[in-house]
Amino acid sequence: MHAFDVLGDPVRRRILELLADGEQSSGAVTAIIQDEFGISQPAVSQHLRVLRDNGFATVRAEGTRRLYAVDTTALQEVDLWLDRFRGLWNQHLDALATELARGKRERRLTKESEGTS
């Protein structure tokens, strides 16, 4: 499965957001996802499996609990794909920064000229 096919599902994206905050038990993830999306425990388990099988999450056993964490392997693939578009974003962000600085300078000059009048 391609990384964006995995990330295309809002439930899987939300699970990754939860795991980004740190390792979580499957029970904790399931409770939150069931509450937010109204899906069954087996459905949440299936989403966790897709994330694990596609390199987005790891799992380790601790007694009877299963603890999930983010695995950055597949995220690196996404990052590499997005890298070719960063130049476009950076140009727009640089232009925005220039306009913000220009606006601040104009407001400062306006205040200064009003203060001397």
Image: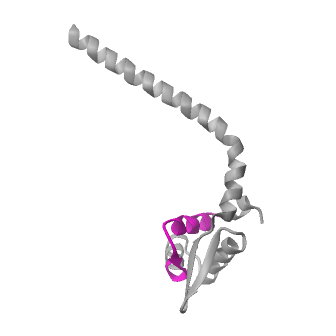
Farthest residue in the right direction?
1
Residue 86 lies, in percent from the top left, at 65, 41
Residue 66 lies, in percent from the top left, at 57, 84
Residue 101 included in the magenta stretch of the image: no
Q: Please give the name of the residue rendered at 27% of the width and 15% of the height, measured from the top-left corner.
A: 112
SS assignment for the magenta stretch, majority = helix
First to last magenta residue range: 9-28
108 w.r.t. 53: above or below: above
Place residue 87 in its image quadrant: top right
Residue 72 lies, in percent from the top left, at 63, 64
Farthest residue in the top direction?
117
92 w.r.t. 35: above or below: above
Residue 19 included in the magenta stretch of the image: yes
Q: Please give the name of the residue rendered at 44% of the width and 21% of the height, measured from the top-left corner.
A: 102
Residue 1 lies, in percent from the top left, at 78, 66
Left of 65 or right of it: where is 55?
right
Left of 79 or right of it: where is 24?
left
Q: Nearer the viewer, residue 38 or 22?
A: 22
Tell me, yes or no, if residue 41 can be seen here: yes
Place residue 70 in its image quadrant: bottom right
Q: Please give the name of the residue rendered at 67% of the width and 53% of the height, measured from the top-left corner.
A: 79
83 w.r.t. 33: above or below: above
Q: How many marks?
A: 0
Place residue 109 in its image quadrant: top left
Left of 54 or right of it: where is 91?
left
Q: Please give the name of the residue rendered at 49% of the width and 74% of the height, measured from the top-left corner.
A: 32
- In the rendered image, the quadrant that contains the C terminus is top left
Tell me, yes or no, if residue 8 can be seen here: no
Q: How is the image coloured?
A: one colour
